Each structure stands twice: as structure tokens, then as C-alpha cells.
Amino acid sequence: MNEPSSSSKPEESKQEPQAGDKPSPSSPSSPKPSSPSGTGKVASKPSEPEKPAKAYDPKIPPRQPAPDVEGLSSSCAMARQQFDSVVGEQNQRLVELKVVATQAIEDTVRRLEEESDRTRSILERNLELAREAERLVVEGRNLAKEQEDLEEQVKEATERTLALEDRVTTLREERNKLEASRNELEEQVNGAAEALAKSRSEIEALEGKVGEKDEETKALEKKKTVLEERLQRLERIRAEFMSEVKRSETALQDLMAVPEGGGTTT
């Protein structure tokens, strides 16, 4: 009758923790899972809440009755399966968290690099803008001086423009006078042209009459030549006649002188 009680002591010492008991840190079958993201906290079971720690009792607890070996082994197997599934899930979650953390770190590093590049480009742009601003300030000063010079030139140009306007007014008046004189001269020229045309027509008519007179003069000269020839012939005939008359008178005088001298001898 006392053998079962004596055999229960080693079985109690070899008894594994139940499914609901919290595993001890020194137990080889319950390794401590590493926490995600390296915080060092032990992952708790998502289905069962953590039990509060019991106060240390210095009294020896009463001996428990000997449990059933088959039920204990089955419960241990179930507990190990549950523990393995929980550890697998935690490991899977850790791997996923590590992957997510790695991606997040890579994204953060990439964003930081992009931000640093953008900041560097912005700084370089700011330096360029600062240099450009300095250059623009210098150019602004130079432009201010140039503006003053231009204002003086504009003032001088305005004075010259006013003087030129007065000169233009004077020239316009003179031009109007010249246009009036030109109109008068054009009228005079038109009158002279009309008189010239009339004179030309008269000259042409006179030239026609002169041509006619020339023809008449030529005809008269021909007649004069004929008459001069006739006159010369008549003068020659007259000279011959006069010589004949003189000869006749001489002969007549000779005839008349014969009776006065006593007759003629035969």
C-alpha cells in the first residue's frame, strides 16, 4: 500500500509545467524569445494574459496526489505544441518586424540622403543666390549712377528738344512762306508757259509765212534775173541802135555837107 506513495516522489520531481503555468527562465525546454526591435522584453502570449507573480511562501506546500501519467504526458505534449506554435508565431513576427524595420530604416536612410542632397542643393542654390544678390547690388549701384547720368542726358535732350521744337515751328513758318512763293511762281510759270506756247504758235505761223515769202522772193529773184538779162540785151540793142543813129547822123551830115562845097566829084 505504501509503494504507490513512494513512487510518486520521483514522478513529481520529473513533472513538466502545465500549459497554463508560466515557464521558468532556467528551463531548457522554454527558451526566452528575443524581443522585436531589440527592446529586451519577453513576448507574451496573445491568447492568455500574464498572471501576477505569487508572493514567496516559506512554508512547504502540501504534497499533491499522484497525477495520471498518460494525461500528464498528453498535456505536456499539448503544452509543447502550443509553446512551439507560440514561439513560431513570435519568430515569424520577429522576422516580419525585422524585415519591416530594415525596410523602414532603408527608407529613412534613403529619405535622409535625399533630404541631405536636397538640403545641399538648396544651400548651393542659396550661395549662388547670395552671390547673385551681391552682384545685383553692385549692378544696382552702377545702375543708380547710370540712371543719374541718364537723367542729366534726358534733361539736356529735353532742352534740345524744346529748342528743336522752336526751330521746327520757325522752319514750318518758313516752309509755308516758301510754299506760298512756290505757288505764286507756279502761277507765273504757268502764265509764262501759256505765253510761250502762244508765242511759239505765232512763231510757227510767222515761220510758215516766212517760208511763203522766201518762195515768193525766190520767184521774184528769178524774174529779176530774167529782166536783168532782157535789160542787158536791150541796152546792147540800144547801144547798137545809138551807134547806128550816130552813123546815120554822120552820114546825113556828110550828105548835107556835099552841096555846100560845090558838089561831089564822080
Image: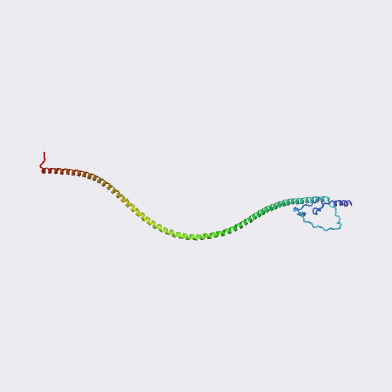
134 or 218: which is nearer to us?
A: 218
Q: Position of residue 231 (x, y in %)?
A: 22, 45
* Residue 237 left/right relative to 113: left
* Residue 143 left/right relative to 206: right
Residue farthest along the left direction in this orientation: 262
Residue farthest along the top direction in this orientation: 266
Residue 179, image quadrant: bottom left
Q: Position of residue 264 (x, y in %)?
A: 11, 40
* Residue 172 left/right relative to 42: left
260 or 220: which is nearer to us?
A: 260
Query: Which image quarter holds the C terminus?
Result: top left
Q: Position of residue 236 (x, y in %)?
A: 21, 43
* Scheme of colours in the image: rainbow
225 or 117: which is nearer to us?
A: 225
Residue 132, image quadrant: bottom right
Q: Position of residue 5 (x, y in %)?
A: 88, 52
